[in-house]
Amino acid sequence: MATHKSAEKRIRQNEKRRMRNVSIKTHIKTRVKAVLKAVDNKNMEEAKSTLVSAVPAIDKAAAKGIFHKKTASRKISRLTRKVNSLQTSES
């Protein structure tokens, strides 16, 4: 266990950040699942609306350092591709 005052503070800070990161990641996973569920149900309107809410959440997490910016970009790209593939299959 830490004995220095600064090390004890660092432990408290790390725990706060960890809890915040877990919360944000869970929130993003929920939004991504909503997009994927809409794509599976072939519901184009719902897929687009959930994608519109998921993309900024992923971008915001990348800006805060929860995800690497390329990881966020990859996630957004894959989600967008799935929604767009639904659009082309309806045509």
Image (spheres, grey):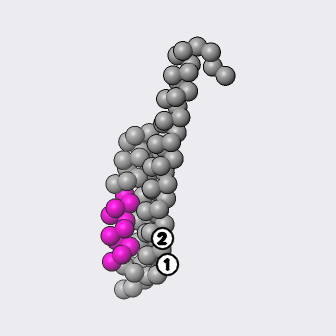
Q: Residue beneath label 1, please?
A: 40
Q: Which residue lies furthest to the bottom in this view?
A: 91
The dot on residue 25 is: none
The kind of residue on which mark 2 rests is Leu
Q: Which residue is drawn at 45% across and 49% down?
A: 24
Residue shown at 38% from the left, 42% from the top = 63
- State whether residue 25 is above or below residue 47: above
Query: Where residue 36 appears, x then y in whole percent?
Result: 48, 70
Residue 52 belongs to the span the image colors magenta: yes
In space, the residues marked 2 and 1 are separated at their CA atoms by: 6 Å
Q: Give the range drawn in magenta.
A: 45-55
In this rendering, the answer to whether 73 lies above or below 68 is below
Name the disc covering residue 36, or none.
2
* Three-letter code, disc 1: Asp
Disc 2 secondary structure class:
helix
Q: Is residue 73 above or below residue 8?
A: below
Q: Is residue 81 above or below residue 87?
A: above
Could you say which quadrant of the image residue 56 lies in?
A: bottom left
Q: Answer whether residue 47 is visible to the viewer in this image.
A: yes
Nearer to me, 79 or 20: 20
Q: In x, y percent, where is residue 8?
A: 56, 21
Q: How crowded is mark 1: few (under 14 residues within 10 Å), some or many (20 or more)?
A: some
Q: What element carries label 1?
A: helix
Q: Looking at the image, which residue is at 38% across and 73% down?
A: 47
Q: Can residue 81 be seen in this view?
A: no
Furthest residue toward top: 4
**Main secondary structure along the magenta-highlighted residues:** helix
Query: Where residue 38 sits in the image (x, y, percent)?
Result: 43, 76
Residue 71 on the magenta span: no
Corner quadrant of residue 91: bottom left
Name the residue nearer the viewer: 91 or 29: 29
**Contact between labelled residues 1 and 2, with CB atoms less than 8 Å apart:** yes
